[in-house]
Image (cartoon, rainbow, N blue to C red):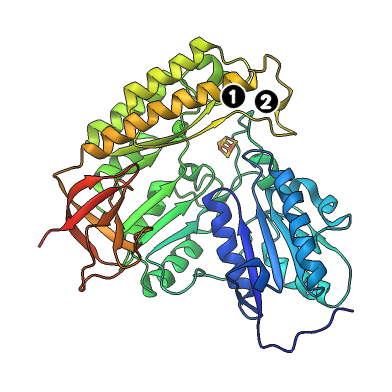
């Protein structure tokens, strides 16, 4: 039996990898555990360490095993330390993660977060390694209004899983088919968050704009946003990530007409070559993608458009890669997440032939990222001298006395100096007076 702690609350340290959905799951987890654990600043202080994994990017399994090795050294000094692994890698690897000298004490899948307090309790009571990686149908309801303190900008998941099956992506396997969350629960959670001071809500879903198809009665994504826009206190609505195929006229019209919806959209292009898009099983083509961009810019002239790009997908020729650069030049994305393709075991793309050599992938990525830097720089430059509204949501990374805000276009603006009367949650007008690599600098307009 493990020794029982007589402290009022222990300390939990959560290491989070990956996307906003994982960050959101971490907040849920902290909320679920708050009766027994408070957040620790470092792993050394913790009585419970959780690794919330992501398998979308580079060699995540390796990272998790090497982290478990490092934590094993901590465990040797602190035998009561409990270690858990959750998220997509846990969903894939299952009990393997609990085996060996540095194995985790518990492993939980993407549908089993609510079981974590129970798993921890079982470990404390000496019931051996705990594994919970079952898929569950429906939505796993968890404590509402999680997140610490009064956060100004809050994530709210509205759907989970994905029905798209892109050939490079593991998400449909690790998170299962798409399930929409009950709209009344979403609205209830947002009302709680608004009452605590939230001003901006970021709706999350793997393909967020296909929300509602499985609901009875059906409710569209726009229908949901209309109801959210009616909640007192919520000034801004964002969403991520929409799927280009599902960006339809009603969404564009609503973004143009509803003053609360931010003027930013993340449109994952992935490749500018129709041949590669087909291999990726992305069910839009470049022509359609560009048509949507034109429609968005026509209705919302100052919209910022960001994207995701993959280079070196199997079969991508130099000419295909050039096509991606051409689309980038045409759209001029405000920012992008870009990666060299790396195969995820269990996906179709992992079995594809015609692999692009590593050095070629690295060289293409470098070219693409440098092109993006030019576009981002021009995008930022375009704001200089203009007055914009920002929602103050934190402090500058380089000086905690200086407040930071975000434009509707999702660009960070650091204020030029501390302003005594300003605080988080305020929406203020600033004049843009300069730029850094990825951010703007603003002075309050008085
Ligand atoms: S749309 Fe494609 S890339 Fe996005 S989560 Fe679904 S399968 Fe993965």
> Could you say which is closer to the camera, residue 309 or residue 25?
309
Residue at x-position 49% and y-position 10%: 319
- Residue 192, image x and y in percent? 43, 72
Tell me: residue 325, above or below residue 158. Answer: above
Crowd class of label 2 (few under 14; some 14 to 19; many from 20; radius 10 Å): many
> In x, y percent, where is residue 254?
30, 44
| Quarter containing the N terminus | bottom right
**Does the residue tagged 1 have its C-beta within 8 Å of any atom of ligand 1?**
no
Q: Which residue is mark 1?
A: 280
Task: Measure the alpha-carbon separation of dots 1 and 2.
Answer: 7 Å
Residue 166 left/right relative to 94: left
Which residue lies at the image location 28% right of the left edge and 70% below the top edge? 423
Residue 227 visible to the viewer: yes
Image quarter where ligand 1 lies: top right
Nearer-N-terminus badge (1/2): 1
Q: Are marks 1 and 2 in contact (CB under 8 Å)?
A: yes
- Residue drawn 36% across and 58% down? 398
Residue 281 percent across, percent down from the top left: 59, 25
Q: For numbered disc 1, what is the local secondary structure?
A: loop
Q: Which residue is mark 2?
A: 349
Crowding at mark 1 (Cα within 10 Å: few <14, some 14-19, many 20+): many
């Amino acid at each position: 039996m493990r020794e029982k702690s007589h402290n009022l609350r222990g300390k939990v340290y959560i290491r989070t990898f990956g996307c906003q959905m994982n960050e959101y799951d971490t907040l849920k987890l902290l909320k679920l555990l708050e009766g027994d654990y408070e957040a620790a600043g470092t792993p050394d202080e913790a009585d419970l360490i959780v690794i919330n994994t992501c398998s979308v990017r580079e060699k995540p399994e390796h990272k998790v095993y090497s982290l478990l090795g490092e934590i094993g050294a901590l465990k040797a000094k602190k035998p009561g330390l409990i270690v858990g692994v959750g998220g997509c890698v846990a969903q894939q690897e299952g009990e393997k993660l609990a085996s060996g000298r540095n194995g985790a004490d518990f492993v939980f899948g993407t549908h089993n977060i609510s079981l974590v307090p129970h798993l921890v309790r079982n470990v404390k009571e000496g019931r051996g390694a705990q594994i919970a990686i079952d898929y569950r149908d429906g939505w796993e309801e968890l404590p509402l209004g999680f997140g610490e303190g009064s956060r100004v900008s809050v994530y709210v998941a509205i759907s989970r899983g994905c029905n798209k099956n892109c050939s490079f992506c593991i998400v449909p396997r690790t998170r299962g088919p798409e399930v929409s969350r009950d709209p009344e629960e979403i609205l209830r959670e947002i009302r709680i968050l608004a009452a605590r001071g939230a001003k901006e809500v970021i709706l999350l879903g793997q393909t967020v704009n296909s929300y509602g198809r499985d609901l009875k009665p059906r409710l569209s994504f726009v229908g949901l946003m209309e109801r959210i826009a009616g909640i007192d206190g919520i000034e801004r609505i964002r969403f991520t990530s929409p799927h280009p195929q599902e960006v339809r006229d009603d969404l564009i019209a609503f973004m143009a007409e509803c003053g609360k919806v931010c003027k930013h959209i993340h449109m994952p292009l992935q490749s500018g070559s129709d041949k590669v898009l087909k291999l990726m099983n992305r069910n839009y083509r470049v022509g359609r993608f560009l048509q949507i961009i034109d429609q968005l810019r026509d209705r919302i002239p100052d919209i910022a458009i960001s994207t995701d790009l993959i280079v070196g997908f199997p079969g991508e020729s130099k000419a295909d890669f050039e096509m991606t650069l051409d689309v980038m030049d045409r759209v001029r994305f405000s920012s992008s997440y870009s990666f060299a393709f790396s195969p995820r075991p269990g996906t179709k793309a992992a079995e594809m032939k015609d692999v692009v050599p590593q050095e070629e992938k690295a060289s293409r990525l470098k070219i693409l990222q440098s092109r993006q830097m030019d576009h981002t720089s021009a995008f930022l430059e375009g704001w200089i001298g203009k007055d914009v509204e920002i929602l103050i949501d934190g402090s500058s990374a380089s000086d905690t006395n200086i407040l930071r805000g975000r434009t509707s276009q999702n660009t960070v603006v650091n204020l030029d100096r501390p302003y005594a009367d300003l605080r988080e949650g305020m929406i203020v007008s600033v004049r843009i007076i300069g730029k850094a690599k990825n951010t703007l600098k603003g002075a309050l307009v008085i």
